[in-house]
Image: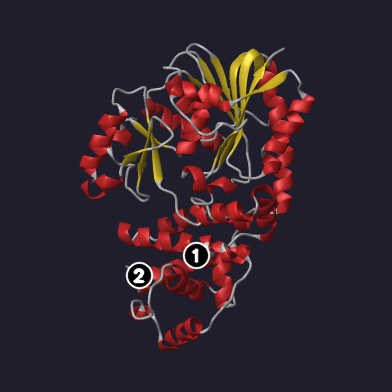
Amino acid sequence: MVNKLIISNCVEVLSESFLNQKPADLILSYFFKKNKNLGSHDRSHIAELFYGVIRNKRYLNKIAGDDVPHKLILIYLIKVLGKSIREIRSILSESEELWLKEIKSKKIVIEDWATKLSVPDWLWVRLLNQLGEDNAIKLAKSLLIPATFNLRVNTLKDKSVAAILVELRESFPQLAKSILETKISPIGISLPRGTAIHRHPLFLNGNIEVQDEGSQILSFLLAPGRGQMVADFCAGAGGKTLAISALMKNTGRIYAFDISDRRLANLKQRLKRSGGSNIMMQRIANENDLKIKRLKGKFDRVLIDAPCTGLGTLRRNPDLKWRQTEISLFELVSKQKAILNSAAQLCKIGGYLVYATCSLLNEENEEQINQFLINYPNFKLILPNTILSKYGITVGHDQYLKLNPYQNNTDGFFGALFKRVE
């Protein structure tokens, strides 16, 4: 239900977003903290409208002819959500209604796909070159559809996937038919976006963690064993660290490395819920920190979830396509190379190394791997399915793990698995 309150608040937060290069989710979170009088339903509608406009911004700009948030919202309601003028008349002034009627009467022809699908030109050129037009269109369309909400069942706890499905369906009877097992991950559950899970006993008790299905698969690709030494090189808030801990049955030791105290503090809170006890958090200054050099050749498994453009997550973070540029891409590619080269030193002979991103671009993925293999002939690629099939996971037969929204209904993920042979 869209009303004037929702529109006016959405205009305010969009105006802030257009002026500020900060992540959209942080801007929205700060806005809600300032406006505590807004109820949960209003917040949900404001968020949906806010992200919908950002997701389709280039297309909306083309029709509206400018960047005025109020106009973009009205065009979004009419052209994307398919509302009739009659349906939204209560929120329109007389001049706005006349303007929308004029817009609807015009036959605006948008021929280029980059505009129709709201993709920046620099990104569209890359998708065309990598995928060809048909698949680039399919991918771009899928990135305009908001993602579902995924959970990972914590196998350190005593509840099975089936048992948790029953509990969730009982807790949310109106959503029961939409609460499903994920199709690829054997420990994943999919729910409608916006499901209020963070105060649910299953979440508070650590039985479930919020984690995209694609991200869950990367932990399986690493194939950590009981009693092993594992490095999660760019641990962030620790979603994959916790998943690895569960796969290891709380044995061995996992070093969670990150440059951010704040992210490691978030991991600490999640760790308390999870019941994991084999994780050691390590803040490092950079990829060349002395702590890294002292651990050279000590690890059975090394995971590098490298900092990247994040373009595989546009269903959740649509503002990234407007905040990232070719310049930031080149800077990230350089950073990824340095991190990959440094983290590889941690891997012992016979150990596994996984390089992963949530990007869709060859520069961050295949091209990084090709260069790494030239520089480090002591590492050999392993086909992902030789590992994933042991967990009952099948995601194609490529030499890399590659997931995307239009083929797999996951975020876009890339993973390369290596074995150090000498």
Q: Residues within 10 Å of mark 1 (few under 14, many from 20)?
A: many
Quarter of the image that includes the C terminus: top right
In front of the other: 377 or 301? 377
Badge 2 marks a residue whose secondary structure is loop
x 76%, y 23%: residue? 376
x 67%, y 25%: residue? 343
Residue 290: quarter of image = top right
Q: Amino acid at mark 2?
A: Val
- Residue at which label 2 appears: 2
In front of the other: 269 or 149? 149
Badge 1 marks a residue whose secondary structure is helix
Q: Position of residue 411 (x, y in %)?
A: 51, 44
Residue 322: quarter of image = bottom right
In front of the other: 288 or 367? 367
Identify the residue at the far right of this view. 375
- Residue at which label 1 appears: 53
Q: Earlier in the sequence, mark 1 or mark 2?
A: 2
Q: Position of residue 103 (x, y in %)?
A: 50, 82
Residue 2: quarter of image = bottom left
Q: Amino acid at mark 1?
A: Val
Q: Tell me the CA gap for discs 1 and 2.
A: 14 Å
- Tag 1 and tag 2, C-beta contact below 8 Å: no
